Image (cartoon, rainbow, N blue to C red):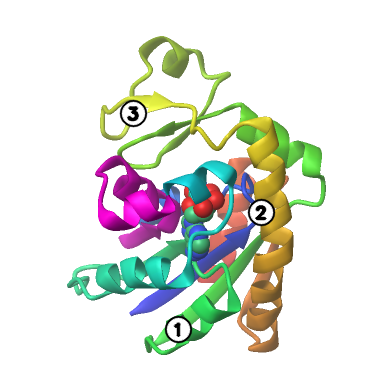
Amino acid sequence: MKRIILFGAPGSGKGTQAKLLEMKYNYVKISTGDLIRAEVRANTDVGIRVKSLLEKGELVPDDAIVGIVKCHLEKDYTDRNGYILDGFPRTIFQAEELSRIQVEHEVAIYLKIGNEDIIVNRMLSRLTCMNCGSIYSMLDETIQRNKTCNHCGNPVGQRPDDNPAVVRNRIHVYRAQTKPVIDYYKGKGLLHKIDASASVEDVTKAIEGILN
Ligand code: AMP
């Protein structure tokens, strides 16, 4: 089993790239943001516990997120070529917990964007499918008109945490808590860095160059 970890600030394109790779390479995409939003929507105990943290752009507690990820990794994915983690691990504790789950190959890819304005603009102009997590731009007229996902037909909309104040906090949280995790993977010799300010197609090509 292969494990691909996508790192990058919010809005760096992790979700978009994970979805494309999932379809092209028969991987399973595990997006902790999507999973935690589903818990909130379903009003589960975990969802009720973390709702306000999500709204503020804070990380949810490690035990909650590690529990959800482990539960997903226990599923039978033998018909898949590997799994892509989008949004996990985000703390050193999570990274250490993940390292207990053995895989044959592991690759960590860092989608780097130097300019914060690009990140903020992307996040404020994106629409997200509430079901499968597919991401669209508000500039896409067809999506604006139909407001449904091209992949699963469910409604798309703006995430409540994609608003200016929360976006700034999410970037701050990313720098403070997740940047050290990127260094952790660099130290292990597993990290590849990509310029994520390029077009979606060019970023996909760069990732494929690493995976092939
Ligand atoms: P994302 O969709 O990846 O931007 O995640 C949305 C929100 O879900 C984050 O702002 C956090 O509140 C929560 N979240 C997602 N992944 C994690 C994680 N690995 N650790 C802690 N909180 C997370």
Label 1 CB-ligand 1 distance < 8 A: no
* Residue topped by disc 2: 9
Measured in 3D between alpha carbons, the distance from the residue under mark 2 to the one under mark 1, in whole angstroms, is 21 Å
What kind of element bears circle 3? loop
Residue under the image location 39 percent in, 67 percent down = 64
Residue under label 3, please give it: 150
Quadrant of the snapshot with the N terminus: bottom left
How far is mark 3 from mark 1, CA to CA?
35 Å
Is residue 70 left or right of 91 when viewed as pictured?
A: left
Q: From the top left corner, tell me how far across and down residue 199 is, in percent.
A: 65, 40
Amino acid, disc 3 = Asn
Q: What is the span of residues highlighted in magenta in the rendered image?
A: 23-50
Q: In this view, does 72 lie above or below 153?
A: below
Element type where label 2 sits in the image: loop
Given the image, on which type of amino acid does mark 2 rest? Ala
Of 182 and 28, nearer the camera is: 182
**Location of mark 1 (residue):** 97
Q: Which of marks 3 and 2 is nearer the N terminus?
A: 2
Q: Residue shown at 72%/42% (left/top)?
A: 168
Q: Which amino acid does label 1 sit on?
A: Glu
